[in-house]
Amino acid sequence: MHSAIQQADQIFVALQHRVAGYLPVKFQSIADVILSVIAIVLVFAFLFAVTTVLERKGLGRIQNRYGPNRVGPAGFFQPLADGVKSLTKEDLVPRAADQAVHFMAPVLLVIAAFLAYAVLPVGRNMVLADLNAGVLFFFAVGTLVELAVFMAGWSSRNKYSLLGAMRAIAQMISYEVPLVLASIVVIMAAGSLSTVSIVNMQTGYSGIWPHWFVLTPWGFAGFNLFMIAATAESNRSPFDLPEGESEIIAGYYIEYSGFKFALFFLGEYLGMFATSGLAITLFLGGWAAPFSFLTWIPSYLWFFAKLLLMIAIFIWIRGTLPRLRMDQLMNFAWQFMLPMTLINVFAAGVWHFMPGGVIRWLVCAVLLIVPAVLLSRGLKQGKKFEARTYRFAE
Amino acid sequence: MFGEGILKGLAETARNFLGSYVSKKRLTTVQYPEERLPQIEAYRNFPFLVYDGEDWQQGLRCVSCFICEKECPPKCIFIEKSTDKKPDAVGKPQFYPTVFNIDVSVCMSCQICVEVCPFDAIKMDTDFELSTDNRFSGLLWDKKHLAKSNEHYHKIHPTEAAVVDAQLAAERAKVAAKAKAAAEAKPAAAPATPPPVPAATEK
């Protein structure tokens, strides 16, 4: 690799070591970690601010209106105005609320969301902690979000918030299963739980084409299943039942105001970025360039380009699909997602033990498409629409 | 097939998203403070007191009859009657309001005060930008704030104002004729007071 390109690629790593180098040797390793943490917190909080305004503008355009366009150039300083507003608002706590838990819930949510970034490689050599069990760590701290959500719903002492929390727990636990099962195929292929080595597996090229896992039948299916489950995990539309504005107002964070409300918002978006980041790491080659002739662009730029693309898709989906009903949500999780992810694990195994070639592709594709069609047909036939008779209304 | 509806929906939203950048026709939003939609004539928002002529204090049509104050459902009108009289729009000497306050924050724009006013003294305005940084005195409008000229009335509700003016002119003519007849019937009587000159300028 050309040295200038390499320098551009490693500029942040070099900067980190340069800054840490000013300290005595004893403190250098801890300074490295602290600098990484600061970078993660700043970058992803900034991304959150940008995403809120992009989302509002995108949704506006989808609905044929302008969206925010008043604060700053084209409305891009809107997050600043929102931040000032939420900071200056009164922080209301219900008298009947469990004060301590009520306070801790948003803090825990944000901490859990930020913890997940520790194992995301955002560029070459740019990972806070290269854990042996990085993927496992990610899912482990991901479950903390559920705890925070239930703490918020329970401690508020409000029927709506409790309902929202119950929905959130049911939904998140149901979708955690397909989420983990969908990522197992990658762990099978990579033979490692470390996010760094998973990305390293995908950095090669055949001709100009990358070795991303999404470019295999099981990887493609796994990616789609993972993204559906990730949408449900991050409580995004169309799976936003826990906070359905039209039904239970804001769900588990109904009793939060001011900055705590903003923290919930932040935590939710950070969770979305983190799961998107994991999807990129597992299936879309992490920081690897999509074509071999584009490797001169720094790796972190590729990661964030992919992340922004995922965010755009999330916004697009949110602007398109209506909210599911609770039974539809559960049926989808247990009757479609779970069998499909299990079949996908089987397909990945078949792929692993078959010799390379077109036949392997065909067998795996058939293994996945046929069950998908059959399962969706089965889901459809399960619903029999009958003319409803109303006993009292007629 | 499964997923077909989702793809269709995604295509539709993508078309909206891109289309809103291409064709202005898609965007129905009016950028309010800079752009405004033309107001329809029947639009009404908050009452004002009509005055004729140049001087708002002299030309105020209100005779302080308290009907609007009594009829006002949310009771947002407060009137104090004068002790002396001055000629009204038609020409008869009448009382006038020394105080006429309307509370903007209480008024519900029902137009009942306008309906009941026998003197066409109170009408509905179209100004809707009533916000103020003083929630006490800024929202309690006094006589001076409420008084607006007949010309203003003509500008905002031309059709209605023309009808009102015609009625007032007819009444004035009737009063003038009566006064003339009375003057002719008793020509010998003392010069007495001349029939009061209509304070209003005919429009």
Image: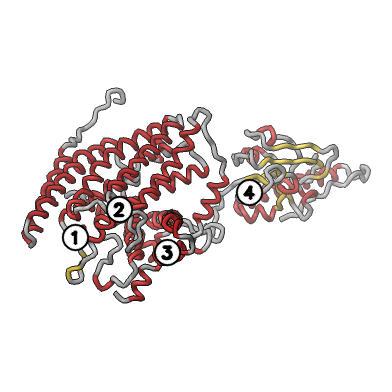
Residue A249 on image: x %, y %: 43, 38
- According to the picture, the residue beneath numbered tag 1 turns out to be A215
Does residue A75 appear left or right of residue A378 in this picture? right
Residue hosting label 2: A278
Q: CA distance from mark 4 to mark 2?
A: 50 Å
Disc 3 crowd rating (10 Å Cα; few below 14, some 14-19, many 20+) is some
Chain hosting mark 3: A
Q: Earlier in the sequence, mark 1 or mark 2?
A: 1
Instruction: Determine crowd level at label 2: few under 14, some 14-19, many 20+ residues with C-alpha closer than 10 A.
Output: many
Q: Chain of mark 1?
A: A
Q: Is residue A254 visible?
A: yes
How many residues crowd around disc 1 within 10 Å: few (fewer than 14), some, or many (20 or more)?
some
Farthest residue, direction right:
B190
Residue at the location (14% across, 52% down)?
A: A348
Up the image or down, A224 lies above or below B76; here it is below
Q: CA distance from mark 1 to mark 4?
A: 60 Å
Q: Relative to B198, is A330 above or below?
A: above
According to the image, label 3 marks what residue?
Answer: A17
Measure the C-alpha gap from mark 3 to mark 4.
Answer: 57 Å
| Residue type at numbered disc 1 | Leu
Q: Which of labels 2 and 3 is toward the front?
A: 3
Task: Residue B131: give its label.
Answer: 4
The chain carrying label 2 is A
* Label 4: few (<14), some (14–19) or many (≥20) C-alpha neighbours in 10 Å: few
The N terminus of chain A appears in which quarter of the rendering? bottom left
Give the amino acid type for the residue marked by disc 3 in the picture: His
In the rendered structure, are the residues bearing label 1 and label 2 in contact, judged by CB atoms less than 8 Å apart? no
Judged from the image, the secondary structure of the residue bearing numbered disc 3 is: helix
Residue A223 located left or right of residue A256: left
